Image (cartoon, grey):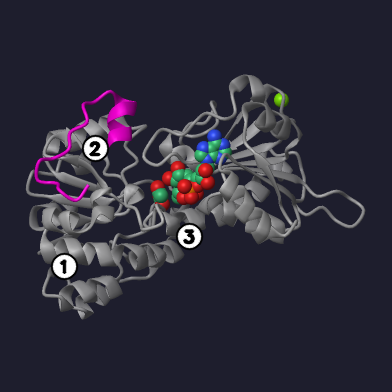
Amino acid sequence: MRVGVPREIKVHEYRVGLTPAGAAELVQAGHEVFVETKAGDGVGFADSAYEAVGAKILPDADAVFQTGELIVKVKEPQAIEYARLTPDHTLFTYLHLAPDPEQTKGLMDSGCIAIAYETVTDNEGRLPLLKPMSEVAGRMSIQVGATALEKSHGGRGMLLGGVPGVQPAKVVILGGGVSGTHAAEMAVGMRADVTIFDRSIRRLAELDTQFQGRAKTAFSTAASVEEAIIGADLVVGAVLIPGAAAPKLVTREMLKKMKDGAVLVDIAIDQGGCFETSKPTTHQSPTFIVDGVVHYCVANMPGAVARTSTIALTNATLPFTLAIANKGAKKAMNDDPHLARGLNVAEGHVTYEPVARDLGHKYVKPDWLTSI
Ligand SMILES: NC(=O)C1=CN([C@@H]2O[C@H](COP(=O)(O)OP(=O)(O)OC[C@H]3O[C@@H](n4cnc5c(N)ncnc54)[C@H](O)[C@@H]3O)[C@@H](O)[C@H]2O)C=CC1
Ligand SMILES: CC(=O)C(=O)O
Ligand SMILES: [Mg+2]
């Protein structure tokens, strides 16, 4: 199969969909890999590194989309990108469609098959292609939150861990899944006072065992969250209902009761955000202030640590990329229900139920899809 890898075009997005090591495995399996020039420059993967393993470099994105059958990316396609997609393409990337009606329409109009990394599942019902980036974003949330708490960034001027004789900052983490747990690891490591909220009793029990009292756990209700955020210095939004728009756990009314200079980091912003006042920001201008509370809502946080993230992402996606290239998208999904759960749009229809529900489209299960 011809695999195309365009350069990412979101603001300050330096990740690339495939490493040279990943390209090498595809070439060894008999596929042709076409990479847009400079696609890996930002993370230290020069064109020559791809050429050395047998990939071909193309001069621009148009050429990559025209040549590739399987397009492997990182971020959801931007308008100029989905305009290039046709019924002959399979797109494999993060999509986050539930809060994004324009992109959904663009993908439907293209007629392509679009498989979203973030809804591919594993045997435990987890999300193996979201996991590596959630690990990165969770860990990063504490370092960006700590910076935002500094006075010069609008924060209340608190050191997360305090110092001897001065109390540490109170960190509240909403959602104790992958990103929330990694956030808690970092916050505990910096000696903050950490509480993790979740609605899964089983997950709270696992976290209780994992943290051995170094972080507290709490069942998430509207009342318990409100009480916690009023006293919090840093709140990390890390909830997820797979594929669906994030639940709004902190309303505008609740925000007014928070301390001036407190910080919200909304990791869940790519699914619409879990704070009512969140709106997506970029690495260029990552924060804004509402009612004295600093909001950090960057939808591609891992792009800031693009080298770590690129390698972690290809490690997770490569087995699926190989399966799609080896078998074709339809057979690969029929052989693997976990990959099939990644199918969000196909041949003009929304094929993922939570996206259809959230955006008011008809859910269509393709007649060729037999594995789910
Ligand atoms: N902004 C960015 O750059 C990035 C954003 N993300 C996003 O972060 C979000 C979280 O991802 P993961 O940690 O992988 O998800 P996950 O599925 O591992 O964890 C989500 C947790 O939220 C819990 N939850 C659901 N509803 C809740 C509620 N009402 N109150 C408390 N907890 C609740 C679930 O029980 C689960 O434990 C997703 O939207 C994901 O797309 C991930 C990577 C990068
Ligand atoms: C998961 C995601 O949206 C990202 O890594 O940018
Ligand atoms: Mg206030």
Residue type pointed to by label 2: Ala
- Observer-nearest residue: 281 or 218? 218
Q: CA distance from mark 3 to mark 1?
A: 25 Å
Q: Residue at x 11, y 59 (%)?
A: 328
Residue type pointed to by label 3: Val
Q: CA distance from mark 3 to mark 2?
A: 25 Å
Say whether marks 3 and 2 touch (CB < 8 Å): no
Q: Residues within 10 Å of mark 3 (few under 14, many from 20)?
A: some
| Main secondary structure type of the part rendered in magenta | loop
Q: Residues within 10 Å of mark 2 (few under 14, many from 20)?
A: few
Provide residue 190's location: percent of width, then percent of height.
72, 59
Per the image, label 3 sits on a secondary structure element best described as helix
Q: What are the residue bounds of the magenta stretch?
A: 352-372
- Quarter of the image for residue 313 reads bottom left
Q: Residues within 10 Å of mark 1 (few under 14, many from 20)?
A: many
What numbered label is drawn on residue 214? none
Q: Residue at x 8, y 58 (%)?
A: 67
Residue found at the very far top of the displayed protein: 253
What numbered label is drawn on residue 305? 3
Q: Nearer the viewer, mark 2 or mark 1?
A: 1
Residue type pointed to by label 1: Val
Q: CA distance from mark 2 to mark 1?
A: 24 Å
Provide residue 338's location: percent of width, then percent of height.
28, 54
Provide residue 201's location: percent of width, then percent of height.
59, 44
In primary-sequence order, the first of circles 3 and 2 is: 2
Q: Is residue 282 visible?
A: no
Identify the residue position indicated by label 1 in the image.
Answer: 33
Provide residue 71's location: percent of width, then percent of height.
19, 55
Per the image, label 1 sits on a secondary structure element best described as strand
- Compared to residue 363, the image places residue 233 above or below, namely below
